[in-house]
Amino acid sequence: MHCIGLDVHSKATNFCVMDPNGKRVREFSLRGPLQGVVARIQVLQKELGPLRICYEASTGAGWLHDQLQGAGRQIQVAHPGKVRMIFRAKRKNDRIDARKLALLTFVDQVPQAHIPSAERRQWRSLIEFRRGQVEKRGGVKSRLRTILRSNAIQAPRGLWSKKGLEWLTKAELGDCQSLQRDLLMEELQEVRQKIGKVEAVLKKLAAQEPAVGLLMTIPGVGIRTAEAVVAYIDDPNRFRRNKSVGCYFGLVPCEDTSQKVRLGHITKEGPSTVRKYVTEAAWQGIRRSPQIRSFFERVCRDDPGRRKIALVATAHHLLRVMLSMLQTGECWRTQEVPPSGVAAAA
């Protein structure tokens, strides 16, 4: 079986073809969009027979994976970060990258990335779009408050309620700042409408996933957190160990250990949206659940300087619990937590 390494870009793609003996038989560059790559692969398959194809995960990787799948083809999508760890060469260009991927395919050592279905990818993209709109809404509100502060105007409570927005439209400002306020309020209204439309679709998608309701049984976990976790975990059985989910979402510390263990900041790998939502859910869980609060306090050790460390550890703990729930189908089990004095004595 011939192996093909593809270094894919939006305007050009480099090919490296190896025969069953590991010898490079063709190297060329193909200019044009990804549709041309699919057509060229079909031509090569007619000439060479069954193919093993490898390329790095990037924008459009899911679409290309769907198009290349077919009889006589084995598609492998490589994890870009892990490929860089394997090949730490000073020379790097598109042709060499295609060679590396072809070689990894030949020796069957490709660090593969998970490619979800097209429907799951669309769900993820809508979740990310909503987060962008929410951040945009926050930016608009911040600029409106800045206008008020620059004029020494004290905003009332509930500024973003209907009554508060009516007060804002009547606030006395200069001509230039009145124009800014009016335009920002129009933008705020537009963003709110967009968020409402997106959340209506997300609600329908979440209703089709029983796993979302399952995760919402955890205290502090709302629909936004649950749907993001389900969408990005996709298949809970693809994780070999329960601890792997924390690494996937970047909630484990960096480690530099030789003779002494040195742990640094969290890696922040993986989707930042899930990391953000789960951390927020951890705060809510600490307030609402004695069980989660007990875990937080145990990590905190009555040291105010460890509160951030304890929060991240709690978020990591919740992710591991979520993965177990998705694998087993069990709801959140509330356990009685003994008083702190009793726990200390025990």
Image: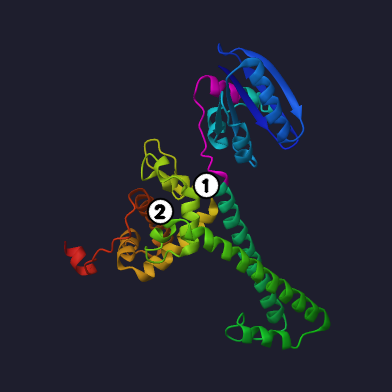
Q: Residue at the location (37% across, 36% down)? A: 259
Q: What is the quadrant of residue 312 in the picture?
A: bottom left
Q: 180 above or below 20?
A: below
User: Magenta residues?
Assistant: 100-118
Name the kind of residue labelled 2 in the image: Leu
In depth, the one of 274 and 115 nearer the eye is 115
Q: Position of residue 149 (x, y in %)?
A: 68, 80
Q: Where is residue 50 in the image (x, y as percent from the top left)?
A: 57, 19
Q: Quadrant of the N terminus?
A: top right
Q: Residue at the location (78% across, 81% down)? A: 178
Name the kind of residue labelled 1 in the image: Gly
Q: Is residue 315 left or right of residue 149?
A: left
Q: In which quarter of the image is the C terminus?
A: bottom left
Q: What is the quadrant of residue 299 in the picture?
A: bottom left
Label 1 CA crowd tier, 10 Å (few <14, some 14–19, many 20+): some
Q: What is the quadrant of residue 83 in the picture?
A: top right
Q: How many marks?
A: 2
Q: SS for tag 1? A: loop
Q: Is-magenta flag for residue 112? A: yes
Q: 154 above or below 245?
A: below
Report which residue position mark 1 lands on.
Answer: 270
Report which residue position mark 2 lands on.
Answer: 319
Q: SS for tag 2? A: helix
Q: Residue at the location (59% across, 35% down)? A: 65
Q: 15 above or below 188?
A: above
Give the alpha-carbon distance from disc 2 to disc 1, as whole Å: 13 Å
